[in-house]
Image (cartoon, rainbow, N blue to C red):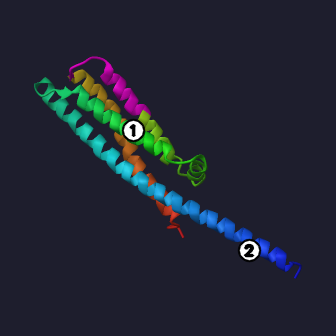
Amino acid sequence: QGFTLRKKFQIGLTLVVVVSAMVLLGVRLLSKAALFHYLEREHVALVLKLSQDLDHAALVGETNPLSREDVRSRLATAQDLARRADHELFLPEQWAFRLLGFGGVLDLPRKDVIDLERMRETLAQGSGAVPPAVVAALQKDMAAVLDNSNRFGPLVAEAADFVRCRWW
């Protein structure tokens, strides 16, 4: 009874603004989750192809050498995809993901960029075909990149489920 009509209207208007902002943020986060799924799919396909090429090169040795340019190109593209996932969210969205407990969605692409850069540096030493010793070194780093990729997809799915209120 202590609320005037004006006060009730202000409270109602404030609630409408807050709920609208939450809905808009939720829709935006869901659209980002869909984009992350697409980027993750492209990244995984590229990383798996590169991993297969490295495994094949390790098996056949120098009889069918792996081209440095092919590997450099795939590493650069994979790194660009990881950077894009890292830069897609504005600061408030990044805070929201971290606050909701999904900071790994931001951290894993950054880790991927670092791991892929290490692979590029390993490959940069020399020219021509990739020798077996370099292939072996690249395979070790590729294991970390594959692990990042394998953890990123399920984490994005969890984040999307949370934003969609699947836990309700």
Q: In the shown orientation, is residue 148 left or right of residue 100? A: left
Depth check, front residue: 76 or 141: 76
Quadrant in which the C terminus appears: bottom right
Residues in magenta, as a range: 114-131
In this rendering, the answer to whether 76 lies above or below 48 is above
Residue bearing the label numbered 1? 80
Q: Is residue 167 above or below residue 91?
A: below
Per the picture, the main secondary structure of the magenta-coloured stretch is helix
Q: Quadrant of residue 123?
A: top left
Residue matched to label 2 = 12
Q: Cβ–Cβ below 8 Å for labels 1 and 2?
A: no
Residue found at the very far right of the displayed protein: 2
Q: Residues within 10 Å of mark 1 (few under 14, many from 20)?
A: some
104 vs 144: above or below: below
Quadrant for residue 60, please give it: top left
Q: Amino acid at mark 1?
A: Asp
As rendered, which of 93 and 166 lies closer to the eye? 93
Q: Using the image, determine if residue 139 lies above or below residue 158.
A: above
User: Looking at the picture, how far across and down is residue 115, in whole percent?
Assistant: 40, 32
Mark sitting earlier along the chain (1/2) = 2
Decide if residue 28 is in sight here: yes
Name the side, left or right, on which 35 lies relative to 48: right
Give the CA distance from mark 1 to mark 2. 46 Å
**Residue 154 is at least partly visible in this image:** no
Rendering coords of residue 148 (x, y %): 40, 42
Q: Is residue 120 left or right of residue 156?
A: left
Picture coordinates of residue 53, whole percent (x, y): 21, 36
